[in-house]
Image (cartoon, rainbow, N blue to C red):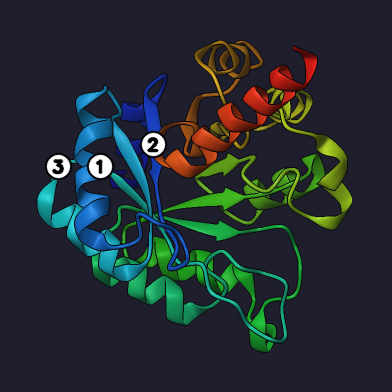
Amino acid sequence: MQRLIMLQALKGQLIASVQALPDEPLHGSETMVKMAGAVLDGGAKALRVQSVDDIRAVKSAFPEIPVIGLIKQDYSDSEIFITPTKKEVIAIIEAGAEMVALDMTGRARPANEQVEELVELIHSAGRQVMADIATYEQGIVAEALGADCVSTTLSGYTPETQHRGDTPDFSLIRRLSQSLSVPVIAEGRIWSPAQLGQVLAAGAYTAVVGSAITRPQLIAKRFSDAMASYSEDV
């Protein structure tokens, strides 16, 4: 029952992705806590946070705010990058996240670990599973494997979906929303409030917005690219 409460509270509420990898200018838990405070002041009701240190820091600063935790980790024997193994799952749970985001694209995991075992581990700890998927078929399988919600996070970032462009995958959101009984979370390439309205109209339960809010280097690049394009026309 506890697993259901968090998702019910997030229906129609903004989830902000607050992340900065080691090669990014804002990397560091102190900065992520400040960023989390800023997006919460702006109305976000939950946070998607990467790395043990950042999850712990954010939960310490904002203990009542739901956190979707993930760890981005490369392994030589797998293409999976988002929470690939049991090691990362345990670390996220121990750091205090209420939900664990898993790549559930069906690709082989490191050391041939099985995603069913990771889902069971997360649920046995009283936490929820967010399935990060890229295609309709993966979303159907993720629900069957026990995911508490399905997110379109990886649409556009796997070999079979790289053609999807720079806008949200409205078609995927619509199809999944019509087929699944678990909530469908829109995530990926949501750059404006207007697009946020479109994903909700397509049937999304709620949405995660990241780069458009919390990665200023990417926001600035969109403006600088536009400036360069306009300057060429002058």
Q: Quadrant of residue 201?
A: top right
**Three-letter amino acid code at the position of disc 2:** Ala
User: What's the CA distance linking mark 2 and mark 3?
Assistant: 15 Å
Q: Earlier in the sequence, mark 2 or mark 3?
A: 2
The answer to which of 216 and 169 lies nearer the viewer is 216
Q: List the residue tagged with mark 2.
A: 16
Secondary structure beneath label 2: strand
Of the numbered discs in the image, which one, if any, rests on residue 64?
Answer: 3
Quarter holding the C terminus is top right
Q: List the residue tagged with mark 1.
A: 36
- Residue 203: percent from left, percent from top: 62, 18
Q: Quadrant of residue 66?
A: top left
Please name the residue shown 73% across and 47% down the image: 134
**Circle 3 Cα neighbour tier, 10 Å, few/some/many (<14 / 14–19 / ≥20):** few
Observer-side mark, 3 or 1, equals: 1
Secondary structure beneath label 1: helix
User: What's the CA distance linking mark 1 and mark 2?
Assistant: 8 Å
- Residue 63: percent from left, percent from top: 13, 48
**Circle 2 Cα neighbour tier, 10 Å, few/some/many (<14 / 14–19 / ≥20):** many
Quarter holding the N terminus is top left
Q: Looking at the image, can residue 75 be seen?
A: yes
Q: Is residue 148 left or right of residue 233?
A: left
- Residue 204: percent from left, percent from top: 58, 23
**Three-letter amino acid code at the position of disc 3:** Glu
Q: Earlier in the sequence, mark 3 or mark 1?
A: 1
Whether the residues at callouts 1 and 2 have beta carbons within 8 Å, the answer is: yes
The answer to which of 19 and 75 lies nearer the viewer is 19
Please name the residue shown 61% across and 19% down the image: 199
Please name the residue shown 56% across and 16% down the image: 200
**Three-letter amino acid code at the position of disc 1:** Ala
**Circle 1 Cα neighbour tier, 10 Å, few/some/many (<14 / 14–19 / ≥20):** many
